Image: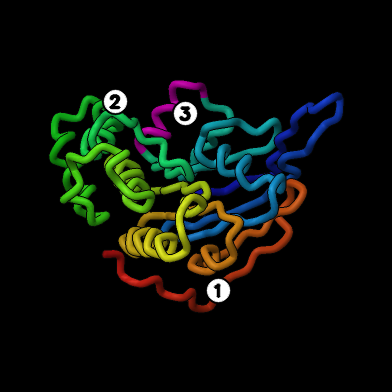
Amino acid sequence: MIRTVSLVKEYNVGGSVVHALDQVDLEIKAGDMVAITGPSGSGKSTLMNILGCLDRPDKGEYYLAGEDVAKLGKDRLAEIRNRRIGFVFQTFNLLPRITSLENVELPLLYQGHAQAKVRASKALEVVGLADRAHHEPNQLSGGQRQRVAIARAIVTDPAIILADEPTGNLDSRTGVEIMAIFARLNQEGRTILVVTHEADIAAYCRRQVHMRDGKIQEIHVASAPPAPPSPN
């Protein structure tokens, strides 16, 4: 599903070159559930942005489902983001003055989908928020907002979900409930990548890719990750 070859990303900061990614080689199979971990500045968010086609590497190759996307144009990258990848962010990124249902509909409206409202309703059911469809974000708890964000991420039926610190703004119990949703989506066949600095959250993933100084330092494969509780 995902393969990177010698990815390099550099930034010029105050006249010095910072190696955000330094010769990163990574393979992720379809249906895998992977945590990308590491301290602040390790390169994990930079890697996530490139894997999500939000940024380009300076050097190296990135293959998504066999297609070299590192050199594609902006329009093609936007199409891939909209149809193949679902994004979940730490800060939820919901529009504040529209309902949960309308937030979830947005990706489908950009596609001109005729059944946007029906599919958005089903996505909210998947994350257990059908009864909050007409609530605005400020009427929801943090965990509920993140569920809306997950519903928005899956409404286009993407093969891959990229989650950047999805539990960072949540208490530990709610964070585990969010991981339960990701685990269930993974069991349904979706590839899940989670960027996190929390070891207990990373432990729910079958593979943990630990980064430091722009390099992959270690890859840990769990024999049997703990099963999160069923989400409410």
Mark 3 closeness class: few <14, some 14–19, many ≥20 residues within 10 Å: some
What secondary structure prevails in the magenta region? helix
Image location of residue 20, percent across then percent down: 72, 39
Nearest the eye: 120 or 177: 177
Q: Is residue 8 visible?
A: yes
- Label 2 sits on a secondary structure element that is helix
Q: Nearer the viewer, mark 3 or mark 1?
A: 1
Image location of residue 221, percent across then percent down: 58, 70
Mark 1 closeness class: few <14, some 14–19, many ≥20 residues within 10 Å: few
Residue found at x 17% / y 50%: 130
Mark 3 and mark 1 lie on one chain; the one further toward the N terminus is: 3
Q: Quadrant location of residue 211?
A: bottom right
At label 1, which amino acid type do we have?
Answer: Ala
**Which residue is tagged 1?**
222
Q: Which residues are magenta?
A: 73-83
Q: Which residue extends farthest right? A: 15
In this picture, is 208 found above or below 85? below
Mark 2 and mark 1 lie on one chain; the one further toward the N terminus is: 2
29 relative position to 94: left or right: right
108 relative position to 145: left or right: left
Whether residue 81 appears in magenta in the rendering, the answer is yes
**Which residue is tagged 3?**
77
Image location of residue 47, percent across then percent down: 61, 43
At label 3, which amino acid type do we have?
Answer: Leu
Q: Which residue extends farthest bottom? A: 223
**Which residue is tagged 2?**
110
Q: Nearer the viewer, mark 3 or mark 2?
A: 2
Q: Quadrant location of residue 198?
A: bottom right
The Cα–Cα distance between marks 3 and 1, rounded to whole angstroms, is: 33 Å
- Label 3 sits on a secondary structure element that is helix
In this picture the colour scheme is rainbow
